[in-house]
Image: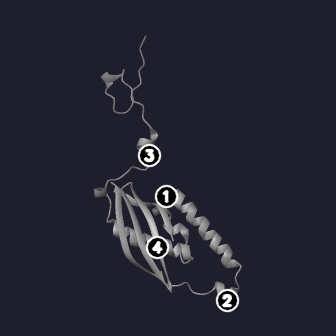
Amino acid sequence: MVKKTSLSLGDEPGDAGKFRQINANEQFAPQVSSKGELPDPEVFVRNFTHRAVEVMTGSRDISQIARWVTEDVYNSMKEQVSGRQRQKSLLPPKVQSQATRTFRLSNVRFSEPREGIIEACVLVTGGNRVRAAALRLEGLDRRWRASSFTLL
């Protein structure tokens, strides 16, 4: 009678008694990246903030920034954009078709509370109004992803 043994990945044939359970999250979940593996955060902060403000003002479709945000941020922004679109639909057609305002980004400030995490604040100036955009970036799979975004 032949004794059957099963091996897991990484085991040597002589180590049949030692089994290691493999967690799928270790292999397939987003992998945390260190700062050395990530691109310059200032470039990402400026580009992402610019595009996110365009999404919030209705100049850009939200699906265009989906790859740079976590699912929670995407859903939150989508909800806010939908609410603004509903409000705008109640306005007269002449007001609805007005061109969107231009804006300028300035004064980018960073902090790094932990390796691979960046928190940033950017001033957004448009028309007679100055607003702040606050975001948190996490290094996942060797790229930055926004895990929090707020336009104050």
Mark pair 3, 2: CA separation: 50 Å
Residue 94 badge: 2
Per the image, label 4 sits on a secondary structure element best described as strand
Q: How packed is label 1: few (under 14 Cα within 10 Å), some, or many (20 or more)?
A: some
Q: Is residue 117 above or below residue 106?
A: above
Amino acid type, callout 1: Thr
Q: Are marks 3 and 1 in contact (CB under 8 Å)?
A: no
Q: Could you say which is closer to the camera, residue 22 or residue 74?
A: 74
The residue where tag 3 is placed is 28
The amino acid type, in three-letter code, at marker 3 is Phe
Alpha-carbon distance for marks 2 and 1? 36 Å
Q: Position of residue 18 (x, y in %)?
A: 36, 23
**Is residue 5 positioned above or below 146 on the image?**
above
Residue tagged by mark 1? 70
Q: Nearer the viewer, mark 3 or mark 2?
A: 2
The residue sitting at 51% across, 86% down in the picture is 128
The numbered mark, 4 or 1, whose residue comes first in the sequence reads 1
User: Which color scheme does this rendered protein use?
Assistant: one colour
> Which residue position is annotated with label 4?
132
The quadrant in which the N terminus is found is top left
Mark 4 → mark 1, Cα distance in angstroms: 20 Å
